[in-house]
Each structure stands twice: as structure tokens, then as C-alpha cells.
Amino acid sequence: MDYGHSERPSGAVALPTAIKILVAGGFGVGKTTLVGAVSETRPLRTEEVLTESGVGIDDLSGVEAKRTTTVAMDFGRITISDDLVLYLFGTPGQDRFWFVWDELALGAIGAVVLADTRRLADCFPSIDYFEGRGTPFLVAVNCFEGARQYRLDEVQAALNLDPEVPVLLCDARQRESAKEVLITLVEHAMKLREARRSAD
């Protein structure tokens, strides 16, 4: 029996495949922006205003103009084709909200780790998390205005990434740029899945 295809009554409409993707990265790297830019529906956001209680806890160096922060998740949806829909879950960036990560990661096919070259070390916790879980991921360097530009191989080396981990540039504000990142992730995750199946 072919478990890859389910039989449908004649004339029945095939439902699209739903894929869950995480959007992770450090504080202020653009996760909420990316989800909002690419989502075809009004994104669900759990943002709160930064207050004085965060002084000494939230590191605003490099993102001094930031006024809000995600405290649980961002959620959006994008239809890639008639048979593929992506559900996006943006993770909170600060350490004190990481207790929600395990719940958000359940069932995810892969993750986008957003990077800011001004605060590149902020990527390491996300990378360590997904490497530890064996979750496919890529690194998308969000091109902030005024930030120094590095070659992708320099970013890959600085983050000590496995050569198979894709690294690409993006503008989290631009829908097409964000969409290209998501498509690259899906292709990467499917390639790894096929490789694991072949190895079994």
C-alpha cells in the first residue's frame, strides 16, 4: 500500500499540505517584521512595550530604537502553491521567554535563524537549540541599513556552521525576500529528509 497518497472520492478536492516553520534569532533581529511582511493574513502578535523593568535584562545595543518585544510568539501563514501552505511561528528572542520554545518547536519541519551582523553572537543560542534537536535550519542575514556587509562564507565561518547549512541574505521587510528564504528552507529540509530516508 502506498502511504504517501490517500485515496479520495472522485471529484474530491485535495487539501494542501500544511508545514510548520519557526522563525528564530536574537532580540530585535527582525522576526516579527519577517512574519508580518510575508503573511497573507493579519499576523497574530504577542508584543509588549519595553519598560524600565527590562533595564539591565534586555540588551538594546544596536537596536536602541526598539520599543516592543515578543513575549510568546508571532504567527502568520503564506500559501506557496495550491498544494503547500506554510504556517510561521516567530519565537521570542529573550532568554526569559525560552520556556515556550519546546512547545513551538513541536512538529516544525525546520527553522529560519535570522542574523544581524552587528550582533552576530546572538545567533548562537538558536543555532545550538536546533542543532541539538536535529531540526533543519538555515541562517538568513537580515540586511539592516548602515550595518557592515560580510560575505556569506565569512558569516558561515564566524558561526561555525556545517557546510550544508544554507546562509543567505534577506530583507525581512520585503515579502519576496522573506518568501525566498522560506522556500529555500523547505527545499533544504526536504533534501535532508530524503537523504535520511535513503540512509535507512
Image: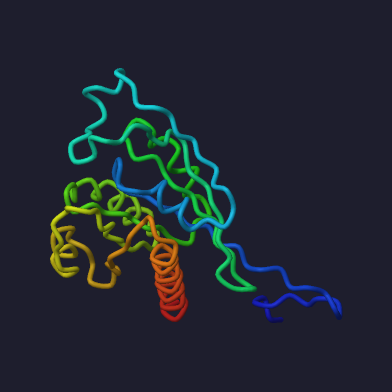
Q: Is residue 93 above or below residue 156?
A: above
Give the percent coordinates (x, y) of residue 179. 45, 66
Report the side of 199 relative to 120 (left or right): right
Q: Is residue 184 above or below residue 60?
A: below
- The color scheme shown is rainbow
Give the percent coordinates (x, y) of residue 165. 29, 68
Quarter occupied by residue 15: bottom right
Give the percent coordinates (x, y) of residue 86. 54, 61
The residue lying toward the viewer, choosing from 183 and 142, is 142
The residue lying toward the viewer, choosing from 80 and 8, is 80
Report the side of 65 relative to 16 (left or right): left
Residue drawn at x 45%, y 55% is 37
Quarter occupied by residue 57: top left
Residue drawn at x 49%, y 46% is 104
Quarter of the image for the N terminus: give it. Answer: bottom right
Residue drawn at x 45%, y 76% is 200
Question: Farthest top residue?
Answer: 53
